């Protein structure tokens, strides 16, 4: 199977004609142009964004053969009640004469649903800007593996810039092909997927995501792991750490409220609704044990709520030397487990040092301890980043 990418942009390309958004302006100023998305399969079968498919002119057939390629129309996971021929087309499952298999979405926002029993894909294009979690689900089903050439379809102004697109592709382990790129299932030195550089899943790999209240830090952490097939979400909030009603607690998820706090309950519900349904959730404050035994990927949200629980459990709010020693041992245990973990871990923490000077001794204690803990974890992380107003500032070590 050979693919020519005639256009790699969205429904109207990128920049989109007439659009004045910041993303399209950046593309125009940089001279980057992605045409309306179109691919050509084996020089014979063309799939275009928004087209109803090669078989639409044949009485809405779900499956047909075009130029030796078997083309099957797939339903859309976001509109499962509508048949493929009545606007519910999610994409195409294409098998070439040489047995190569391709998955391609019908339009931006579409999530094609491969049939039960489908074989692994050799090439898969996905609208990851619209729904990155579909990548994790297909990997969990074994339909996309490390041998699959996986690429972003419909690169457009839903992402802020080409640079941000490349950053996301890096942690999703997918390619961002451009117009005119070619890919084939044949592997050789002269042809093949050399335009589609692949990133491998590196373990151990630790990422610390910092940010203030409502900065978007949790969303960015979840985005990083959306493409992984095996993710455990580690919740450290007051649903499991009972004495977190102090006003000195962190400002993010797991903040000052306790289990009866309606605002906290709403935040927890929003987090749950945002996460992929197949992720596991563990509620614990024993992060050292979780890091030591982790399988797959971990998302810890967050370090601030863990610290608030540790302060409570160690009796450290009173400021005594004995409780301070217990807390120091507890944080040292966490840092050591973070340093020695064999997992791929993304942890969210509050950047507490940028706010108003706390008005209570407990507030100052929490701020100081969290600042020290953030420093220790960042020093033992492959990556650290600060999220401000939804924008990412990588914290490079030089």
Image (cartoon, rainbow, N blue to C red):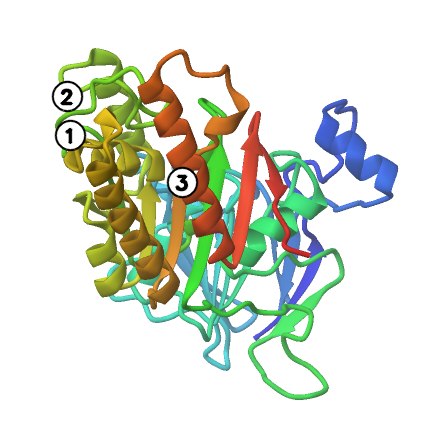
The crowding category of the residue bearing disc 2, from other C-alpha atoms within 10 Å (few below 14, some 14 to 19, many at least 20), is some
In which quadrant is the C terminus drawn?
bottom right
Could one spot residue 263 in this view of the protein?
yes
Circle on res. 253: none
User: Whole-percent x and y of residue 360?
Assistant: 35, 14
Q: Is there a contact, CB below 8 Å, between mark 1 and mark 2? A: yes
Q: Is the residue 19 above or below the residue 5 in the image?
A: above
- The residue to which callout 1 is attached is 239
The tag earlier along the polypeptide, 1 or 2, is 1
Distance between the Cα atoms at labels 3 and 1? 17 Å
Residue at 20 percent of width and 18 percent of height: 245
Pick the front one: 11 or 54 = 11
Which residue is painted at 74% across and 46% down in the image? 35
Q: Which residue is mark 2?
A: 259
Picture coordinates of residue 42 (x, y %)?
A: 62, 71
* Residue 348 disc label: 3
Q: Give the Cα distance between marks 1 and 2.
A: 6 Å
């Amino acid at each position: 199977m050979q693919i020519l990418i005639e256009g790699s942009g969205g429904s109207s390309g990128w920049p989109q004609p007439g659009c004045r958004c910041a993303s399209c302006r950046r593309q125009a100023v940089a001279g980057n142009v992605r045409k309306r998305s179109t691919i050509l399969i084996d020089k014979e079968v063309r799939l275009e964004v928004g087209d109803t498919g090669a078989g639409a002119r044949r009485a809405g057939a779900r499956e047909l053969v075009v130029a030796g390629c078997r083309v099957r129309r797939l339903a859309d996971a976001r509109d499962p009640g509508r048949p493929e021929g009545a606007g519910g087309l999610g994409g195409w499952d294409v098998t070439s004469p040489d047995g190569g298999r391709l998955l391609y979405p019908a339009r931006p926002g579409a999530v094609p649903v491969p049939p039960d029993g489908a074989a692994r894909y050799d090439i898969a294009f996905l609208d990851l800007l619209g729904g990155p979690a579909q990548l994790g689900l297909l990997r969990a089903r074994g339909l996309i593996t490390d041998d699959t050439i996986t690429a972003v379809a419909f690169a457009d102004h839903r992402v802020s810039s080409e640079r941000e697109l490349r950053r996301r592709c890096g942690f999703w382990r997918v390619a961002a092909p451009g117009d005119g790129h070619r890919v084939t299932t044949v592997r050789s030195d002269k042809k093949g997927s050399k335009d589609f550089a692949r990133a491998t899943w590196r373990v151990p790999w630790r990422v610390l995501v910092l940010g203030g209240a409502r900065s978007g830090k949790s969303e960015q952490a979840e985005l990083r792991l959306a493409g992984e097939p095996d993710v455990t979400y580690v919740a450290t909030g007051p649903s499991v750490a009972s004495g977190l009603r102090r006003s000195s607690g962190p400002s993010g998820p797991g903040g000052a409220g306790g289990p009866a706090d309606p605002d906290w309950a709403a935040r927890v519900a929003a987090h749950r609704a945002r996460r992929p349904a197949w992720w596991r959730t563990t509620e614990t404050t024993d992060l050292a044990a979780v890091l030591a035994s982790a399988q797959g990927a971990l998302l810890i949200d967050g370090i601030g709520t863990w610290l608030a629980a540790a302060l409570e459990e160690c009796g450290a709010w009173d400021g005594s030397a004995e409780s301070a020693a217990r807390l120091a041992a507890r944080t040292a245990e966490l840092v050591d487990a973070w340093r020695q973990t064999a997992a791929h871990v993304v942890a969210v923490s509050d950047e507490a040092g940028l706010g108003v000077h706390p008005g209570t001794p407990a507030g100052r204690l929490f701020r100081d301890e969290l600042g020290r803990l953030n420093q220790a974890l960042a020093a033992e992380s492959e990556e650290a980043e600060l999220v401000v107003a939804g924008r990412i500032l990588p914290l490079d070590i030089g």
